[in-house]
Image: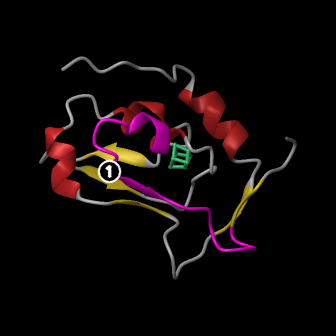
Amino acid sequence: MVVIDTIRDRTGLERKLALNAYNVDRNRAHIWIIDSDCCLQCERQQCINCCPAACYSPLEDGTVLFSYEGCVECGTCRIVCNEFENVGWTYPTGGHGIQYRFG
Ligand code: SF4
């Protein structure tokens, strides 16, 4: 399997993301992996490579760990998981989620 490093300057990106503020809804994940076993069939696992906030991480057993707390609500994971459509996606409840600073 070829892993493509699409985000080369991870440090610079993390510096910019750190400017934002987050009001995390601890009672409700607004995005979730529908069936973790389904990820075992997905050869490319593009959610890991494409999420700008690095919310998706590969696990040793081939499944994917998802953490919604740092999500920037861009919708990329919903688009790239187009083979299995295994990402449940909604916006956070009103008043929660990312608060953009400086655009
Ligand atoms: Fe990552 Fe964007 Fe999906 Fe949030 S919506 S988990 S930032 S790809």
Residue 80 sits inside the magenta stretch: yes
- Say if 8 sits above or below 93 in the image: above
Magenta stretch containing residue 97, yes or no?
no
Instruction: Determine if the C-beta at disc 1 is less than 8 A from ligand 1.
Output: no
Mark 1: amino acid: Asn
Direction from residue 81 to residue 54 in the image, left or right: right
Colour scheme: secondary structure
Q: Residue at x 38, y 55 (%)?
A: 66
- Residue at image position (19%, 50%) is 38
Q: Main secondary structure of the magenta part?
A: loop
In this view, 72 is above or below 12: below
Secondary-structure class at tag 1: loop
**Where in the figure is residue 37, as x and y percent of width and height?**
15, 54
Question: For this view, does 16 lie left or right of residue 36?
Answer: right
Q: Is residue 79 left or right of residue 60?
A: right
Where residue 6 sits: x, y (%)?
47, 20
Please state, as top left, top right, bottom left or bottom right, where the N terminus lies in the image.
top left
Residue 45 percent coordinates (x, y): 30, 35
Q: Which stretch is magenta? A: 78-96
Residue at the right extreme? Answer: 102
Camera-nearest residue between 18 and 24: 24
Residue 74 location (% of width, % of height): 62, 44
User: Which of these two is toward me, 27 or 83?
Assistant: 83
Q: Quadrant of the C terminus?
A: top right
Residue under label 1, please give it: 86
* 41 sits left or right of 47 in the view: left
Q: Nearer the viewer, residue 37 or 64?
A: 37
Q: Is 67 situated above or below 60? A: below
